[in-house]
Image: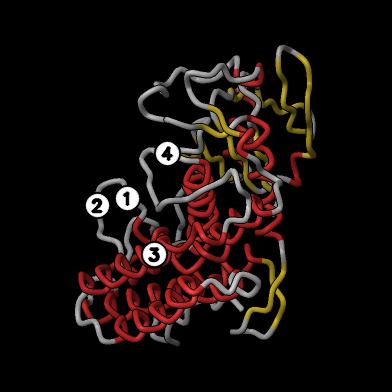
Amino acid sequence: MAVLYVTDQGALLAKEGNRLVIRKLGNAIHWVHAFRVDQVVLMGNISLTPGATAFLLQEGIDTVFLSIHGKYRGRLISQLGKNIELRRLQFGRMGEEAFRLSMARAYVKGKLDNCRVLLRRQNRGLEDEDVTRTVHRLRGFMRQVGGCDSIESVMGMEGAAAAAYFGCFGRLLREEDVSFDGRNRRPPRDPVNVLLSLGYTLLANAVETQVNVAGLDPYMGCLHSVEYGRPSLVLDLMEEFRPVLVDSLVLSLFNRRVIRPTDFYRPEDREPAAFDFAESEPVREDYPILLGHEGMRKFIRAFEQRLAARTLYGNTGRRLTYREILLEQVRMLVRALGEETGYVSFSFR
């Protein structure tokens, strides 16, 4: 799947012949063959020409709008999935308490197992006792999740396990100038949390794309409560992939010094010229620290490389890209809705 990210503030995306062209100040700064694009992600103050908008809708190219800081705003979709019978089945099955509970357990056990594997992998060279204890604690939480008799108790167990996991996450960072004292968001207040939040937004976008491909309703899930405007199913399905596609990537980028503290800035500091066309949104109170333009480019590039990386998918025995695995997990959910098979979370090995 080819994804076109547009991050240059003040840019214009146009359709010219058989190409999608990004222009800034009247000059073409990048172009791609239109037929090669499967999704477009616009970050910040980006404009679309009427011709580009018509083309994206006509070809059914998923177009996503994010703020300059990676906050999801919405998407341009030509039409909803036509499989109304599948969505009827989805709403019916997800109204069954037993089914919802079994799915919630599967999502959380998959997430905790992958968190445990990530900690164990990262701790091989460190041999940190606190990390080792957390690995054992996560195994215990996984056993307890299997005995939970309500969605609320599953969520409570997930919360306790997440606190333990992020409690030792900072010990895995090897860059002296980078620290992590725990998960914080809305807004994130340090470089590690900035990347975690951005990564989870990009992951949610990738999952929602596959949910739309399968024809499911992204707003009706099992684990996360159904609320107005909340894509509960997307949040459910991305749980097991958070440590696999985001947490491990953030650690790698900092530990390999691909992204450094100098890639971030504070609102009171003037951002480089790349942000001269930045959208007008309050940042001083809302965003105590921000990822700069070049850092954003590096992170997006690394995230797309991770999605394109191949690994063994245990349910088929084949090597698939992570993006393909996201779709396979959604398809497995579809089969579970029809009671063809149970849902098995993806295991990070």
Nearest to viewer (mark 1 / mark 4): 4
Three-letter residue code for mark 4: Arg
Residue 303 appearing in the image: no
Q: Which amino acid type is marked by label 3?
A: Asp
Sequence-wise first label, 1 or 4: 4
Front position in the image: 124 or 6: 124
Secondary element at image label 4? loop
Q: Is residue 182 in view?
A: yes
Q: Which residue is mark 2?
A: 227
Which of the two discs, 2 and 4, labels the residue nearer the N terminus? 4
Q: Secondary structure at mark 2?
A: loop
Residue 308 shown left or right of residue 137 in the figure: right
Q: CA distance from mark 2 to mark 3?
A: 13 Å
Circle 1 sits on which residue? 230
Where residue 113 sits in the image (x, y, percent)? 47, 77
Crowd around label 3: few <14 · some 14–19 · many ≥20 (10 Å): many
User: Which mark is drawn over residue 91?
Assistant: none
The residue where tag 4 is placed is 189
Disc 3, SS: helix
Question: Which residue does the image show at 38% across and 73% down from the upper left?
Answer: 108
The Cα–Cα distance between marks 1 and 4, rounded to whole angstroms, is 24 Å
Amino acid type at mark 2: Glu
Which residue is rendered at x = 31% and y = 81% of the image? 145
Disc 2 to disc 1: CB gap under 8 Å: yes
